[in-house]
Image (tube, rainbow, N blue to C red):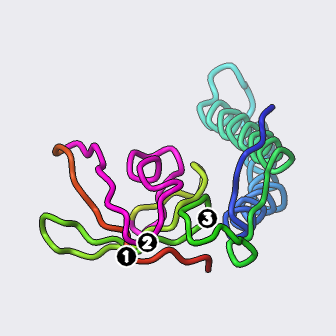
Amino acid sequence: MTSVPLTKFGAELLKEELHQLKTKERRIVIDAIAEARSHGDLSENAEYDAAKERQAFVEGRIAELEGKLSAAQIIDPTTLDADGRVVFASTVDLEDLDSGAKVTYQIVGLDEADLKLSKVSVTSPIARALIGKSAGDVVEVQAPSGPREYEILEVRYI
């Protein structure tokens, strides 16, 4: 398995989810299966089928998270020294050259990307356009609405 890049914050989120699944969700599913079994005939027991499906989902997610965390390359943005270039985990202030709107994005791993929190995946078009660039550079991003140009105002490692 190849390494999975994660920010320190993203790794903590995955660890919290894994802990929740192992300590709480497993117990809830086991109790639901036991309750459904107590109702008798399992061949026509929808509660039992639903509980078993939930168990499969929980165990699958646990295995997925354990795999990602074991292959994780955890990057703490505060320890980066990239000479002002945009790299994984950096925070970038941009100005849209058409509208003048200013936006800020942090480049993160696929699992922690959340546009509402201004976190974009390293595989997204905007992140791919920004990687390796520095403050003052102008980048063109192929957006769904067409090409857009942004000027990099500042690159931070926070």
Query: Do the numbered discs 1 and 2 sit on residues whose CB atoms are within 8 Å?
Result: yes
Q: Amino acid at mark 1?
A: Leu
Q: Earlier in the sequence, mark 3 or mark 2?
A: 3
Magenta segment boundaries in residue numbering: 116-144
Residue at image mark 3: 89
x and y, in percent, of residue 100 in the image: 17, 74
Q: Up-down: is 23 above or below 51? A: below
Left or right position of 139 against 55: left
User: For the residues marked 1 and 2, what is the alpha-carbon distance in whole angstroms?
Assistant: 5 Å
Query: Which corner quadrant holds the N terminus?
Result: top right
Q: Earlier in the sequence, mark 1 or mark 2?
A: 2
Whether 132 is among the magenta residues is yes
Left or right position of 54 against 141: right
Q: Earlier in the sequence, mark 3 or mark 1?
A: 3
User: For the residues marked 3 and 1, what is the alpha-carbon distance in whole angstroms?
Assistant: 17 Å
Residue beneath the point at 83% across and 46% down: 66
Tell me the crowding category of disc 2: few under 14, some 14 to 19, or many 20 or more residues within 10 angstroms, Cα based. Answer: some
Residue at image mark 1: 153
Whether 57 is among the magenta residues is no
Q: Amino acid at mark 3?
A: Ala
